[in-house]
Amino acid sequence: MGMMGTAVSGMLGDMNWLTTISQNVANANTPGYKNIETEFETLVDEAGGGGGGSNVGGVATSVRGLNSLQGSVVATSTPTDLAVQGDGYFLVSDASGALYLTRNGSFVPDASGNLVNSAGYYLMGYNVQNGQSGGTANSTAGLQKVNVFTSGETATPTTTGTLSMNLSSTSPVVTGALPSSNAANATYTDETSIVAYNDLGGAETINLYMTNTGVNPVTGADTWQITAFNAADAAPGGGFPYSSGPLATETLDFSPTTGALTSGSPFSIPVPGGQTMSLDLGQTTQLASSFSVNAATINGNAPGSVTGVSISSDGTLNFQYSNGASSPGYDIPLATVPSEDSLTSVSGDAFQANQNSGAMRVGTAGASGFGSIASSSLEGSTVDLATELTQMIEAQSSYQANSKSFQTGADLLDVLNNLKS
């Protein structure tokens, strides 16, 4: 009977081994799947009596997940497909809101725009839209479902700009009324315009007048006056007088020997209905050539709608807009535990922390102790089919050998039952 019991425990152990092998083979193509293995341990029948002999008890098995293994990262064409390179798991939730860990990053928007993976788990992150800050370190407070439909149209007001010009050093000095006086007979040397954006994304044309005012008697610098007006306030037909005074006026000083600008930059201009623009004039020169505008760049955008998202290696999800602007929408954190292989496995290639795994720690991707996030990528399964099929043959042979032991024990039992007194 002892022989048969030991053989039965061996067959059960081999059956468990074959079950884990089958589980691994079935999930060979599951994104982020970590293969599992069966571990064997000897059982001893301690109640079988003393005597110094071996008390045969058979074998027992346990299943261990190899969660700390890194799967290969494969590129995809979907920007919301995510893979973790290094330590860490995505924080996800089920329909009831319970939190889990997973490496399955096959996220796509559902009908409501929430990112959900192939197992039905929702990606969780910190909403940082409208200037909100992300969650605190090592905390799950404030986590929300990451939604790629929540950001509507957006407009970016102008705050900075760069204008590079050449003002002719041979132009005559203006002696009449300057543009800053906003007089009908105001005289200027050169004029150009730039377009800035107000707080609502509306385009505001700003007229700039540059006037040669001669040599500063104190410093010896060649001086010019630059004056900004709101083009919408110009007189009928354009020009002076404007219905309201200048937006800003500044004196530009140039070196009489090099023609380089020595003071007057940046030029601060309050954009009508918007922010104050800091216009960098540092590359403006006064040389003996005609007036020219060499380069002009102004930040800000007109209203635009969301055209897509991008996700950086630190987990920042940015919304991309049709006007070329982008803005951060979510911070996607990672989580880990001290003993990854001790996590409790649940359906859908997800895990829960437990007493053996240790407490969950949450942080930013790329920070100390956490891997990075790769967008348009998926982590493949860690299953090696060649290894699994080889172990399947070994498990099958072991099962057959244990069944032979059981059969031998049954035959001996028949002999004993057939003994006659």
Image (cartoon, grey):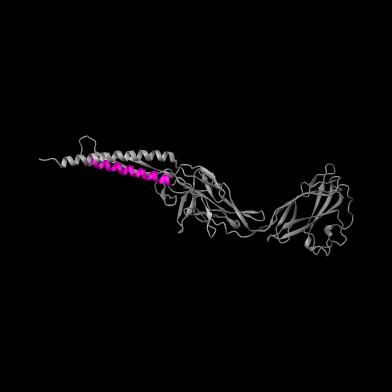
Specify the segment rendered in magenta.
1-26
Residue toward you, 254 or 208: 208
Residue toward you, 420 or 300: 420
Examine the rendering and report whether any part of residue 44 can be seen.
no
Which residue is at the far left?
Answer: 421
Where residue 395 appears, as percent x and y from the top left, is 35, 40
Which residue is at the far top?
Answer: 52
Q: Please report the residue visible at 59 percent of the width from the left and 59 percent of the height from the top.
A: 151
Residue toward you, 267 or 129: 129
Where residue 383 appears, as percent x and y from the top left, is 44, 42
Relative to residue 259, is residue 193 depicted above or below? below
Instruction: Locate residue 421 relative to residue 334 in the image: left or right.
Output: left
Q: Please report the residue visible at 81 percent of the width from the left and 46 percent of the height from the top.
A: 285
Instruction: Locate residue 279 relative to residue 26 in the image: left or right.
Output: right
Where residue 126 appears, as percent x and y from the top left, is 54, 54
3 is within the stretch colored magenta? yes
283 is within the stretch colored magenta? no
Where residue 209 appears, as percent x and y from the top left, is 82, 55
Q: Please report the residue visible at 81 percent of the width from the left and 52 percent of the height from the top.
A: 251
Relative to residue 73, is residue 187 depicted above or below? below
Position of the N terminus by quadrant: top left
Looking at the magenta stretch, what is its main secondary structure?
helix
Position of the C terminus by quadrant: top left
For residue 400, what is the image quadrant?
top left
Relative to residue 108, is residue 256 depicted above or below? above
